[in-house]
Image: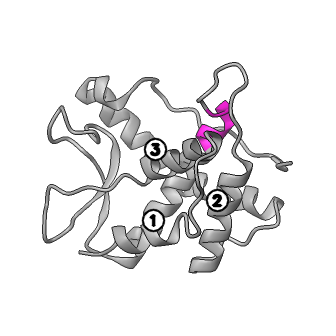
Amino acid sequence: MVDWGDYEVYVPPLWGLPSEMTRADARVAYNDKMAHRLERIEMLKTLARLNGLSMEEDPESVDQFGKWLVDEVQEDPEEPERLLPIWYSVVFDTGLYVGDLIIDRNPNLGWTLHKRGKKNVNHQKHVIMGYPTDSRYSVDPDGYVAGLAHRAISGKTKAESPLWDYIVIASED
């Protein structure tokens, strides 16, 4: 059973898929995410501590949290194959946390609003870019964490290292 404590759900300023927003609306949504990034990560760390987890920036702590997330995430009984709404906020917060860890490992990288290619899966999402070997390449920590959570509620195999391996791979040039 998850101890939610005073966890507050992230409420974006605009609802909808980033790829379907106007460029101006996508920029508003991105700016809000970045403005609240550190606050959301602190909210996540508090949630983790309430549930007996350390949020250090080492492989064991990160993977312990990742395993907790995939063990505890819950499906919405009213909408099978979807997460309970509160878990989407946890996924979002975890994506920000993982993204910042990727950036910490590689100072060439940074958060950006993906503006290239309307058909690109990351179009108008908050992603990490700045890879010197390919300026068009981006990683989407939020999407990765969402994938882990959805695999967990579907009963698919859980990775031994659900987060740290991703951080290491995504931080490489």
Q: Are marks 2 and 3 in contact (CB under 8 Å)?
A: no
User: Which residue, given by chain and number where applicable, does mark 2 sit on?
Assistant: 42
Label 2 to label 3, Cα distance in Å? Answer: 14 Å
Q: Nearer the viewer, residue 61 or 114?
A: 61
- Report the span colored magenta: 83-89
Q: Is residue 39 magenta?
A: no
Q: Nearer the viewer, residue 40 or 114?
A: 114
Q: What residue is rendered at 59% in x and 51% in y?
A: 40
Camera sees residue 43 = no
Q: Nearer the viewer, residue 57 or 64?
A: 64
User: Which residue, given by chain and number where applicable, does mark 3 sit on?
Assistant: 33
User: Amino acid type of disc 3?
Assistant: Lys
Q: Nearer the viewer, mark 3 or mark 1?
A: 1
Is 159 located above or below residue 58 in the figure?
above
Write down the quadrant of residue 138 in the picture.
bottom left
Q: What residue is rendered at 64% in x and 21% in y?
A: 79
Q: Nearer the viewer, mark 2 or mark 1?
A: 1
User: Which residue, given by chain and number where applicable, does mark 1 sit on?
Assistant: 100
User: Amino acid type of disc 1?
Assistant: Asp
Write down the quadrant of residue 157 in the picture.
bottom right
| Residue 154 drawn at (x, y percent) | 61, 39
Q: Which quarter of the rendering shows the C terminus?
A: bottom left
Q: Main secondary structure of the magenta part?
A: helix
User: Amino acid type of disc 2?
Assistant: Glu
| Residue 5 drawn at (x, y percent) | 84, 48
Crowding at label 1, few (<14), some or many (≥20) Cα neighbours within 10 Å?
many
Q: Earlier in the sequence, mark 2 or mark 1?
A: 2
Question: Which element is circle 1 on?
Answer: helix
